Amino acid sequence: MKRRVVQLSPGTGKPEQIATVLEHEIRSGVLGFGDRLQSENELVQRFSVSRNTVRKGLE
């Protein structure tokens, strides 16, 4: 499933914002039980951040 590109805002750390977006998608049902998260590369492109930032957001 293709998801929209997310523009992160300054002020809050990018990893925290990534975690918040993914948590919201899980809680709201965008990601259902048994669904897989996007790959690291897809998340890098979606959030326009480095792979390291994505990994920190997933911790």
Image (tube, grey):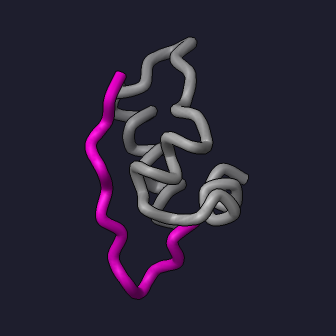
- Residue 59, placed above or below residue 17: above
Q: Which quarter of the figure has residue 29?
A: top left
> Which residue is rendered at x = 36% and y = 69% of the image?
8
- Please state the horizontal and vertical placement of residue 34, each as a whole percent of the image: 56, 12
Residue furthest to the top: 34
Residue 51 position (above or below residue 37):
below
Q: Who's the residue at 31% across and 56% down the image?
A: 6
Q: Quadrant of residue 37?
A: top right
Query: Mainly helix, strand or loop, the magenta region?
Result: loop
Judge whether 50 appears above or below 3 on screen: below
Q: Is residue 29 above or below residue 39?
A: above
Q: Is residue 2 magenta?
A: yes
Q: Quadrant of residue 7?
A: bottom left
Residue farthest along the bottom direction in this orientation: 11
Q: Is residue 7 left or right of residue 55?
A: left
Give the image location of residue 10, x and y in percent: 37, 84
- Give the number of callouts: 0
Q: Nearer the viewer, residue 30 or 51?
A: 51
Residue numbers of the magenta segment: 1-15
Q: Position of residue 32 (x, y in %)?
A: 44, 18
Residue 39 highlighted magenta (yes or no): no
Q: Residue at x 40, y 49 (%)?
A: 46
Q: Residue at x 56, y 22 (%)?
A: 36
